[in-house]
Amino acid sequence: MDVGSERYDLTAETVSEFSDIVYRLALSYTGSREDAEDVCQEVFFRLFRKKPEFESKEHCRNWLLKTAANCSKTLLTSPYRRRSVPIEDTGEQSACDEYNDGFVENAVRSLPPKQRLCIHLFYYDELPLKDISRVTGLRVNTVKSHLQRARTKLKCLLEGEFDDV
């Protein structure tokens, strides 16, 4: 190995270090705890099956997030999911309530998927626009547009909720 080149080696710690952000992204995207767990499992299965080489920890994180976003999209558009009928409300707490429990989080969940994904990556995972672009496969300007549109929608949805704060 060259003196100046560093590689990020995959270890068991990789799972524990990144499983939370992968799970949160999948939960934000799918809106279901069970689906998020399935996505998370699939992402790490792919990681250890393919064993890609990463230049850095950030490269690994971006690969995991992109894979999680793609697996979430695939899950939501699968033919099985379109044919299945949701179980009626059982009176239990919503699966998303584990992730968030407030006005802002409900408003974020009501956004279209691409806007919700950009908001999640920007505010929850604190990724820069360039990394969000890599993760989503969208151009940086498109990411900016999604963020701006999402902020506008959130402002309308939340108007009046926090006036007395």
Image (tube, rainbow, N blue to C red):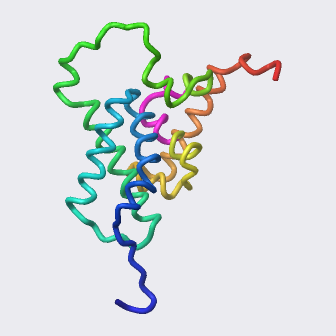
Identify which residue, 58 or 134, lies in the foreground.
Answer: 58
Q: Tell me the residue at 70%/19% (across/down).
A: 159
Residue 86 falls in image quadrant:
top left
In this picture, residue 59 sits left or right of residue 83: right
Q: Is the magenta stretch mostly helix, strand or loop?
A: helix
Query: Does residue 125 sit above or below 99 in this rendering?
Result: below
Report x, y in % for residue 18: 43, 54
Please state, as top left, top right, bottom left or bottom right, where the C terminus lies in the image: top right
Which residue of the protein is positioned furthest toward the right in this rendering? 164
* Residue 156 is covered by the magenta coloring: no
Q: Tell me the residue at 66%/26% (across/down).
A: 155
Report x, y in % for residue 55: 40, 73
In this picture, residue 24 sits left or right of residue 67: right
Query: Does residue 39 sit above or below 45 in this rendering?
Result: above
Identify which residue, 66 or 95, lies in the foreground.
Answer: 95
Query: Does residue 143 sit above or below 106 in this rendering?
Result: below
* Residue 116 is covered by the magenta coloring: yes
Residue 54 falls in image quadrant:
bottom left
State how many labels appear. 0
Range of magenta residues: 108-118
Report x, y in % for residue 142: 48, 46
Residue 33 falls in image quadrant:
top left
Query: Does residue 76 sit above or below 88 in this rendering?
Result: below
Q: Tell me the residue at 62%/29% (across/down).
A: 152
Q: Tell me the residue at 56%/40% (across/down).
A: 147
Report x, y in % for residue 6: 42, 81
Please state, as top left, top right, bottom left or bottom right, where the N terminus lies in the image: bottom left
